[in-house]
Amino acid sequence: MRNHKKLRPAGTILLAGLWCGTGFTIGARADETAAAALSGPYVTPSVDVDVQYEMPSPDGGSPVHQEMRWQVVSLRQRVDPENSVIYMITSWQDHTLTVVDTLKHRISRMPVPGAALTPPGKVAPGPFQRLGTDFVAGQYCVNWRTTDQDGRQSDACYTDDGIMVRATQQGRVMVRAVSVTRGPQSDAVFAVPADYAAVAPAH
């Protein structure tokens, strides 16, 4: 679960590669009237959550996976790519992205790339078309369509508490949630190791 100019998953998650209540727990039909009144989706989670995502492999092999964890009170996100010694922590309070290398025991910190975060509970700016509801990874979601800055059509399905569970581009699924677990995320999840050496970001 990264940040797009118009269609903004929280932080730098999805496709980082990429980037988070109630979550339609009473069913999609009961929420359709309220969702239809919105001009766009909530694109940043309003609850703490742990989401497991899968994406197509660049080489056409088995799907690749990554875990995204989000803490709403501190506006922090952690992304762990599958089978990687590197993970990423985005802090929207200080607008930094920290890459942590657990093998070489070093960190690199840089400004968060892309546009500003849409706050939890706020509708994302930009033109959106509501396409209807769906059910992904056990979650009811509303599918929204927009066009990116390069003119490509993009769809994303968001729960009513701002969790993206699927994103497609020009009809191709780019990322899909396989599990969504709402629950408190501890500060320790987002802690940057204090004894790691700081290095300049790679270019």
Image (cartoon, rainbow, N blue to C red):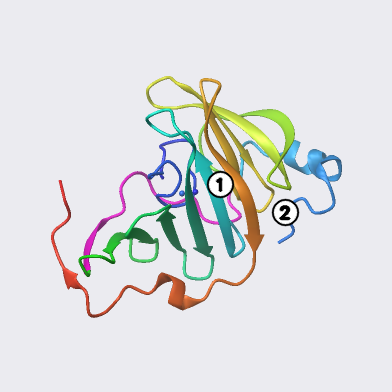
Residue beneath disc 1: 43
Image depth: mark 2 or mark 1 in front: 2
- Viewer can see residue 123: yes
Disc 2 on helix, strand or loop? loop
Q: Residue at x 35, y 59 (%)?
A: 87
Task: Name the spot of residue 86 as percent of width and height, x first.
Answer: 31, 58
Q: Quadrant of residue 127?
A: top right
Magenta residues (range): 106-123
Q: In the drawing, does residue 62 fall left or right of residue 180?
A: left
Disc 1 on helix, strand or loop? loop
Q: Which secondary structure type mostly characterizes the magenta part of the structure?
A: loop
Amino acid type shown at disc 2: Gly
Q: Earlier in the sequence, mark 2 or mark 1?
A: 2
Mark 1 closeness class: few <14, some 14–19, many ≥20 residues within 10 Å: many
Q: In the drawing, does residue 7 fall left or right of residue 136?
A: left
Q: Residue at x 39, y 66 (%)?
A: 93
Quote the CA–CA distance across marks 2 and 1. 13 Å
* Viewer-side residue, 126 vs 85: 85
Q: Residue at x 60, y 72 (%)?
A: 184
Kindly identify which numbered label has been placed on residue 23.
Answer: 2
Reply above or below: 58 against 191. above
Reply above or below: 50 against 54. below
